[in-house]
Amino acid sequence: MNEYKIILSKYIPENAVEIIYSWIMQYKFHLQISRSRTTKLGDYRPPVRMHTHKISINYNLNKYAFLITLVHEIAHLIVWEKYKKSVKPHGKEWKTEFKYLMINFFDDKIFPKDISNALSVYLENAFASSVSDLDLTRILNNYDNKSDFILLEELPQNTVFKIHNGRIFKKQGKLRKRYRCLCLENKKEYLFNPLAQVVPVNT
């Protein structure tokens, strides 16, 4: 196994390494393992000002979430090569490519059954991000390395918590699919994804 495959095996399931490596060679993209970003799990940059395609994925994703996110971004690459800017970023063309690529990872039983089932449902109408599918995200979160954080939806109402940047909030009521949370610093309300990772604060 070459050095690139050894690195890949640290971030994705072992049975997926050969397929991903072959796509890296085929599409000649640069894969960057990125720091954790709260606004996105991965990113694709076309070779507009560069010589190669560039894909970056957050380093702290579990292997299953990393693989799904990586395939998501490779689908963007393929759509760019076929259509450039003439189609929507997450339009039917992207959905078609994403589904077609993901099929490669079901036959080898790469995903645990609970993820596989949720992923199959998600692929029926893939959103812009897997994070948009709360059921799939909840299941993927079960495979994270647990730390001091918990999910916002697990906190009782009126619980005080802090987020990644240290800002302090109080959980309030739910508005459609998101929770209203009061920032205790500026007294403004913000909407949070129920699966936001937060740390309770003792008051």
Image: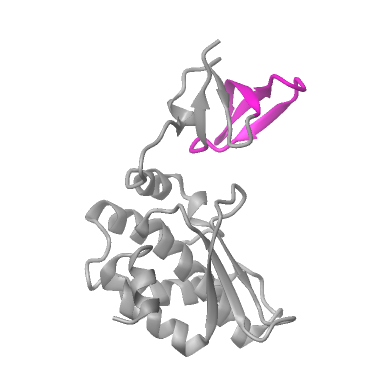
Outermost right residue: 186
Give the answer, above or below, for where 165 lies relative to 88. Answer: above
Image mark count: 0
Q: Position of residue 2 (x, y in %)?
A: 34, 82
Residue, x 66% and y 78% (percent of image)? Answer: 46
Residue, x 34% and y 80% (percent of image)? Answer: 19
Q: Nearer the viewer, residue 98 or 36?
A: 36
Q: Nearer the viewer, residue 17 or 110?
A: 17
Q: Is residue 26 magenta?
A: no
Compared across the picture, whether 107 is left or right of 96 comes to left
Q: Is residue 188 magenta?
A: yes
Outermost front residue: 3
Q: How is the image coloured?
A: one colour
Q: Main secondary structure of the magenta part?
A: strand
Q: Split into 4 quadrants, where in the image is the C terminus?
A: top right
Give the answer, above or below, for where 111 lies relative to 193. Answer: below
Q: Nearer the viewer, residue 165 or 158?
A: 165
Magenta region: 167-196
Q: Split into 4 quadrants, where in the image is the N terminus?
A: bottom left
Q: Position of residue 14 (x, y in %)?
A: 27, 69
Instruction: Inspect this view and state whether residue 173 appears.
Output: yes
Residue, x 48% and y 38% (percent of image)? Answer: 195
Compared across the picture, whether 128 is left or right of 106 comes to right
Q: Position of residue 86 (x, y in %)?
A: 71, 80
Q: Position of residue 83 (x, y in %)?
A: 64, 84
Residue, x 52% and y 50% (percent of image)? Answer: 132
Instruction: Inspect this view and state whether residue 121 appears.
Output: no
Compared across the picture, whether 166 is left or right of 3 comes to right
